[in-house]
Amino acid sequence: MAVIDVREAIRSALKEEMLRDPDVFILGEEVAEYDGAYKITKGLLQEFGDRRVIDTPISEAGFSGLAIGAAMAGLRPVVEFMSFNFSFVSFDQIVSNAAKIQYMTGGLFHVPIVFRGPNGAGPRVSCQHSHCVAALYSHFPGLKVVAPYTGADHKGLLKSAIRCNSPVLFLEHELEYNTKWEVPDHDFLVPIGKGQILKEGKDLTIVSFSRPLRFCLEAHEHFKKKGITIEVVDLRTIRPLDIGIVLESLKKTHRLLIVEEGHKTNGVGAEIIAQVAKLGIHLLDAPVGRVSQRETPLPYAANLEALCLPSTERIIDEIKTLLRL
Amino acid sequence: MHAPLSGFSYTTYDKKKVLSSLGKNRALELFSHMFKIRQFEMMSEGIYLEGLVAGFFHSYMGQEAIQVGAVNAIGMDKGHWITTYRCHALALLTGCSPIQGFAELLGNQLGCAKGRGGSMHFVTKHMPLGQGIVGGHTALGTGFAFKSIYKGDDLVTYCFLGDGASVQGVFYESINLASLWSLPIVFIIENNVWGMGTHHKRAVAMDPIGAHIAKAFDLENHLLDGMSVLDSYALFKEVHERVSKTKRPVIIEAKTQRFKGHSRSDTEYYRSKEDMEEIRSLDPIESFKKDLIAEGFTTQEELKEQEKKIKEELFQSLEAAKKGAPCDIGDIESGVESD
């Protein structure tokens, strides 16, 4: 077990998969000579050469489409978006092509591709660099959307994503790249589509993914001191959604709070609530709570930004309401 | 206000030389392919009008010489073939049987895309599906060409688009990447004058389109008379040999005219009866028949016989396609994604 940061966990997944499969290659803006805008790909150009670690122009639609075509032709590209906000420029390529081609061609073509990069709010960069795309892309059949939190999950899920024969959007978080975790040294995979319990509890279930789990865990500690235990469910994958783990948890807690960095309207939480309402409404003893980004583009000013994003304080307040404390 | 196709500086070839290099049998094959596509499109429109086919339907009638020349010059397995929603011809030329084609239009299990694509999305293993978003497929084309460089294979990617697509942003991104990274891809702008109902002179600030783009991106370019299957054949043969060696992209603009509306739903208010008569007079199949007869390769009677045979074959194919089982409703959610 080594202690490494998330950046290193992602890099080691890339490296191991590139060593394993010569058809895996990386392309994106600044990924090679610059070592990556967030240094995820540091050293990979030296190790694998410019045939497999490829700098692109600022041309997201072009290089995303190129990578999708290359995947259809049998390669396994890993596309880095400097920010998932820039994937909007590639939206047509991801939605019209990557998501749909396997089905449209009756399985004659597959699109084994990974789009990865930081998702959600960076520090104080205002709204055009801060969107959480989890709900948006998980709308589309044909795409898988993964958003890990722990170091081991970053590594194990990215390796699974690269081996997957469908397109996977692998959502990272800039503010978690430096977080250190214990990560197993051996070659391991984490399956796509399976959530996990990060903390057990009996009084309320929080369902979340990616960086907001940090605040959920802090809220767990806060209530633990008061003798209230909060179960924290890490979805890890947004599509396909592991609704089973949510229902299992509700059998114990009967109370649900969903925390996400994206917006509330038609968000990931909305889908979870709809599925719980269909499959397990009898499990609920209280209205369902949501903490998400407020319904504004993210503002720059420090005090406004802090208010807009999910935080430990907002989560604690919402839990107090749900538990009538 | 349609543009006549004369008065441009086309890359042309000596007809007699091309015919003699082809030889009688291959030359007659080109004719068969063009006629088969024409007939397929006419019969498909027929079953559309009968109500057996639905959705958008874009006919390739009038443009046959371009893709017939290209695929015959190169060979379907020597290229990756990327095209738009006007895709029936290229599919038939790259391995889709007429039965699979008709069945896809009818939307049943025998269809080349198992009834999931319809008219706009025919697919073969050499032609990764007709693409519905104008211009979006040009980026996919660069990906296939990139694969050839990555793997070191000898394939060249042929990416067809219309004059309307030639001003989509992603097309310029694709050309930039293709030129920057020296990808073996040929972009063929089939300029059939109209982007739906908008004349290219009202949509594209360049004429000829291909030559201007090629200059900006430092590429070889050709202007092709898209109504001449012999010029098309000879040009694609020459370009293929060169791109196989140089691995540099090439742009070909083929001036052509579609005989039908943009799609079945196009009322064609923008072309008069006189316009259509003039356009029809440019029929690439009729002019090629004259060439074949003049060369002594065949006679009017033999051609008639050949046409009859093709029609018969297609009628049988249509009947066979109609016998295809309906798509399995139990299968509706299968194949959306893989593990």
Image: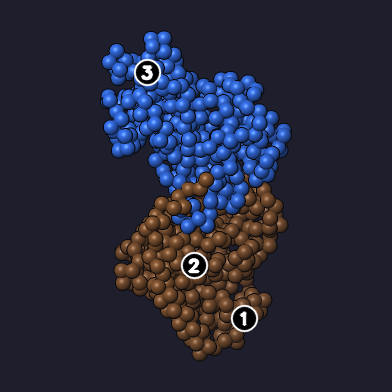
Chain colours: A blue, B brown
Discs 3 and 2 share one subunit? no
Visible in this render: residue B26? yes
- Amino acid type at image mark 3: Ile
Q: Which mark is residue B25?
A: 1
Specify the subunit that label 3 lies on. Answer: A
* SS category of the residue bearing label 2: helix
Q: Which mark is residue B89?
A: 2
**Disc 2 from disc 1: Cα separation:** 21 Å
Q: What residue does disc 3 label?
A: A315
Badge 3, how many Cα within 10 Å: few under 14, some, many 20+?
Answer: many
Residue B31 percent across, percent down from the top left: 54, 77
Q: In the displayed structure, would residue B233 be above or below residue A61?
A: below
* Location of the N terminus of chain B (image quadrant): bottom left
Tell me the CA gap for discs 3 and 2: 59 Å
Amino acid type at circle 1 is Asn
- Say which amino acid is labelled 2: Ala
Asked whether the viewer can see residue A28, the reply is: no
Q: Position of residue B143 (x, y in %)?
A: 58, 49
Pointer 2 and pointer 1 on the same chain: yes
Q: Residue furthest top?
A: A225
Q: CA distance from mark 3 to mark 1?
A: 78 Å
